[in-house]
């Protein structure tokens, strides 16, 4: 049991580091002893939570590199910097994601009218970008013969969003979650299995962690309806996700690969 969950001396890479959940994953990894090489989109604003972690742990434990996960050349450069500055990564958290409703660009669409362009970025970042990051960093994990890749999926990898959560918004056309979002996450879960089977013999485990709805900024009517639908009666807090991540990142899950760990308060059990 000794040190089962310890990440002492490990090097972790986390994409989408400046978003809401980025800081949750990074704090968990840092507190368990790992150093973290963080990536986010050029131009993304440093979050308050990330800034605080930087101050608390210092530049020799947490470093930020602006890199688009769709850009292989930029990823190769970032990877070189990680190898030089921190060493060979043994943990990769593929967290960068886009979940923009088709109305976000200013025009709302009926489902039958949504242009393909609205789906393209979601698929490119959530699925193809995740594959690209896994290729670039996974190569070095395979060379080292060890590693754990954690792909952040979603509740909506397995089920479709319940449109009734949004009917109080009464907009015309109605508010829609992006149709490509769940599809991109379902693809992530399958890609997880694919990579896991190919890389198991190379010592690299690949799993998906699929959170349910995480509390933060949603309107009250949505929150009430969502919580009513969850057996545990509430949305997830950041803290609910730390243990599952640490489990998958650490030796505690040494015989676990190719699986999807769903952390949804029982949402999909009903
Ligand atoms: N928050 C939730 O309720 C929830 C629930 C289930 C799953 N998820 C998943 O968890 C992950 C994180 O969610 P979040 O709530 O922190 O989202 P967020 O929007 O707050 O953060 C996403 C981050 O990804 C970055 N990003 C976007 N495109 C990128 C690109 N091309 N290259 C590099 N970085 C890019 C953004 O700049 C941002 O910092 C996502 O994959 C999301 O789908 C979130």
Image: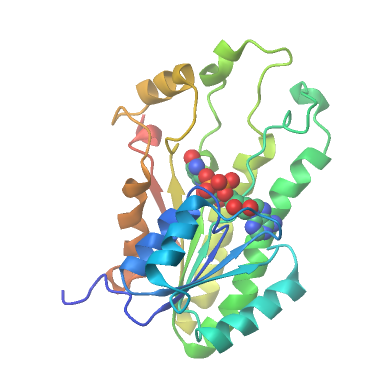
148 versus 86 height, above or below: above
* Near-viewer residue (192 or 90): 90
Instruction: Please say whether residue 154 is visible from this viewpoint.
Output: no
- Residue 84 image position (x, y, % from top left): 57, 88
Horizontal and vertical percent position of residue 41: 67, 59
Residue positioned 78% across, 23% down in the render:
109
- Tell me where residue 256 sits by quadrant: bottom left
Q: Is residue 168 visible?
A: yes
Q: Is residue 252 left or right of residue 126?
A: left
Q: Is residue 165 above or below residue 181?
A: above
Total tally of numbered discs in the picture = 0
204 to the left or right of 140: left
Q: Residue 64: percent from the left, percent from the top?
A: 57, 69
Residue at 64% x, 65% y: name it.
131
x and y percentages locating residue 207 in the rendered image: 45, 62
Q: Residue at x 79, y 24 (%)?
A: 112
Residue beneath the point at 51% across and 85% down: 88
Q: Quadrant of residue 9?
A: bottom left
Image vertical order of residue 112 relative to residue 188, above or below: above
């Amino acid at each position: 049991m000794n040190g089962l969950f310890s990440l002492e001396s490990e090097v972790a890479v986390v994409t989408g580091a400046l978003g809401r959940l980025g800081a949750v994953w990074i704090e968990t990894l840092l507190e368990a002893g790992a150093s973290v090489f963080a990536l986010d989109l050029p131009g993304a604003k440093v979050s308050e939570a990330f800034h605080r972690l930087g101050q608390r742990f210092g530049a020799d434990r947490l470093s930020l590199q602006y890199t688009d996960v769709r850009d292989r050349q930029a990823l190769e450069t970032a990877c070189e910097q990680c190898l030089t500055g921190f060493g060979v990564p043994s943990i990769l958290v593929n967290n960068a994601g886009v979940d923009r409703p088709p109305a976000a660009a200013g025009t709302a669409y009926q489902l039958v009218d949504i242009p393909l362009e609205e789906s393209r970025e979601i698929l490119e970042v959530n699925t193809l970008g995740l594959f690209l990051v896994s290729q670039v960093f996974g190569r070095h994990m395979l060379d080292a013969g060890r590693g754990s890749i954690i792909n952040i999926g979603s509740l909506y990898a397995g089920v479709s969003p319940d449109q009734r959560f949004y009917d109080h918004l009464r907009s015309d056309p109605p508010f829609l979650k992006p149709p490509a979002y769940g599809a991109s996450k379902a693809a992530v879960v399958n890609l997880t299995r694919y990579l896991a089977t190919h890389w198991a013999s190379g010592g690299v485990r690949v799993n998906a962690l699929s959170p349910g709805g995480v509390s933060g900024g949603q309107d009250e009517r949505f929150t009430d309806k969502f919580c009513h639908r969850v057996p545990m009666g509430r949305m997830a807090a950041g803290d609910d996700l730390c243990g599952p991540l640490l489990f998958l990142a650490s030796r505690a899950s040494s015989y676990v690969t190719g699986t999807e760990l769903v952390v949804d308060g029982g949402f999909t059990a009903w």
